[in-house]
Image (cartoon, helix red, strand yellow):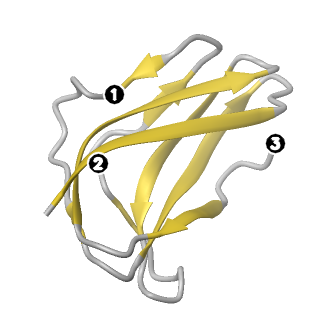
């Protein structure tokens, strides 16, 4: 599982505000990372939260982090930047909670 890469997850057809997210890994121990708000071409990404999450083998609930969640604009890409990977992680799943602006 590569670290320090940004993966585009989906292109948003409308503006949202992130209210939290959950993540889990299969295989290995953990992946640290951060949600990313990218431009219309899935480039020029910036972290959505002020803290990286550490996603483990059980559900990691990031809805209670003391983060400032950013508004994510319509017609932009939303992604995940992986940081430190511990163990032989097979895959990572990230689910985002949000409200439509």
Mark 1 vs 3: CB contact within 8 A: no
Q: Mark 1 vs mark 2: which is more N-terminal? A: 2
Q: Residue at x 29, y 78 (%)?
A: 74
Q: What is the number of the mark on residue 49?
A: 2
Residue 25 percent coordinates (x, y): 68, 25
- What is the CA distance from the residue labelled 1 to the residue labelled 3? 22 Å
Q: Residue at x 80, y 29 (%)?
A: 89
Q: Residues within 10 Å of mark 3 (few under 14, many from 20)?
A: some
- Residue topped by disc 3: 1
Picture quarter with the C terminus: bottom left
Given residues 29 and 60, the one toward you in this image is 60
Q: Secondary structure at mark 2?
A: loop
Q: Is residue 24 left or right of residue 68?
A: right
Q: Is residue 65 left or right of residue 60?
A: left
- Residue topped by disc 1: 62
Q: Residues within 10 Å of mark 2 (few under 14, many from 20)?
A: some
Residue 35 percent coordinates (x, y): 43, 51
Q: Secondary structure at mark 1?
A: loop
Q: Mark 3 vs mark 2: which is more N-terminal? A: 3
Given residues 72 and 15, the one toward you in this image is 15
Mark 1 vs 2: CB contact within 8 A: yes
Q: Mark 1 vs mark 3: which is more N-terminal? A: 3
The image quadrant that residue 53 belongs to is top left
Q: Is residue 100 left or right of residue 54?
A: left
Q: Is residue 80 depicted above or below 95 in this figure?
A: below
């Amino acid at each position: 599982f590569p670290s320090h890469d940004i993966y585009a997850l989906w292109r948003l057809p409308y503006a949202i505000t992130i209210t939290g997210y959950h993540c889990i890994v299969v295989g290995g121990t953990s992946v640290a990372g951060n949600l990313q708000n990218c431009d219309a071409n899935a480039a020029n990404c910036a972290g959505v939260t002020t803290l990286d999450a550490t996603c483990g083998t059980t559900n990691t609930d990031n809805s209670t982090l003391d983060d400032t969640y950013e508004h994510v604009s319509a017609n932009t890409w939303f992604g995940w930047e992986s940081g430190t990977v511990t163990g032989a992680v097979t895959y990572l799943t990230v689910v985002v909670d949000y409200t439509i602006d």
